[in-house]
Image: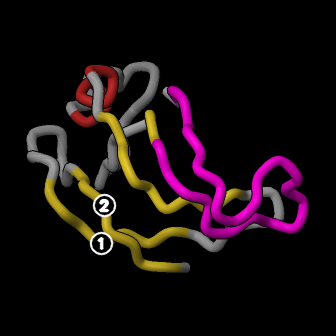
């Protein structure tokens, strides 16, 4: 496990604020990315405010953002598509 910095909401009414969160260690099929840019869009705000709780309840602290640009910092042994140093984009993962 590793501590990393993130912007998170502590509750449905809390603002996004800097926070330190624990990340699990990457597995053999993971690509670890240093996030350079991340968009926070309207669907993220619905999630943060727990407005979709009937189908997708929010767990807090909630770290929004699902449109990401970053640089690959590590790849698992089973990963064949990316290598360390690649510039990558992650699309919508709602």
- Residue drawn at point x = 33 percent, y = 35 percent: 39
Position in image of residue 63 (x %, y %)? 33, 49
- Pointer 2 residue: 6
- Residue drawn at point x = 58 percent, y = 70 percent: 24
- Residue drawn at point x = 17 percent, y = 39 percent: 12
Which class describes the residues within 10 Å of circle 2: few (<14), some (14-19), or many (20+)?
some
Residue 57 image-quadrant placement: top left
In 3D space, how far apart are the residues under numbered discs 1 and 2 (Cα atoms)?
6 Å
SS assignment at label 2: strand
Question: Which of the pair 68/43 is nearer the observer?
Answer: 68
Position in image of residue 76 (x %, y %)? 79, 66
Does 2 sit left or right of 63 as displayed?
Answer: right
Residue 46 image-quadrant placement: top left
Q: Which residues are magenta?
A: 69-92
Quarter holding the N terminus is bottom right
Disc on the earlier residue, 1 or 2: 2
Does 13 sit left or right of 20 as displayed?
Answer: left
Question: Which of the pair 25/78 is nearer the observer?
Answer: 78
Does 22 sit left or right of 18 as displayed?
Answer: right
Q: Name above or below for residue 5 compared with residue 54.
A: below
Q: Are marks 1 and 2 in contact (CB under 8 Å)?
A: yes
Does 65 sit left or right of 77 as displayed?
Answer: left
- Pointer 1 residue: 20
Which class describes the residues within 10 Å of circle 1: few (<14), some (14-19), or many (20+)?
few
Q: How many marks?
A: 2
- Residue 90 included in the magenta stretch of the image: yes
């Amino acid at each position: 496990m590793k501590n990393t910095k993130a912007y998170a909401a502590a509750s449905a009414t809390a603002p996004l604020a800097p926070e330190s969160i624990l990340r699990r260690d990457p597995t053999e099929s993971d690509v670890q990315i240093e996030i350079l840019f991340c968009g926070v869009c309207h669907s993220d705000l619905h999630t943060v405010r727990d407005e979709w709780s009937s189908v997708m309840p929010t767990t807090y602290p909630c770290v929004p953002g699902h449109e990401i640009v970053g640089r690959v910092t590590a790849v698992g042994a089973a990963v064949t598509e990316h290598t360390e140093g690649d510039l990558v984009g992650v699309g919508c993962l709602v």
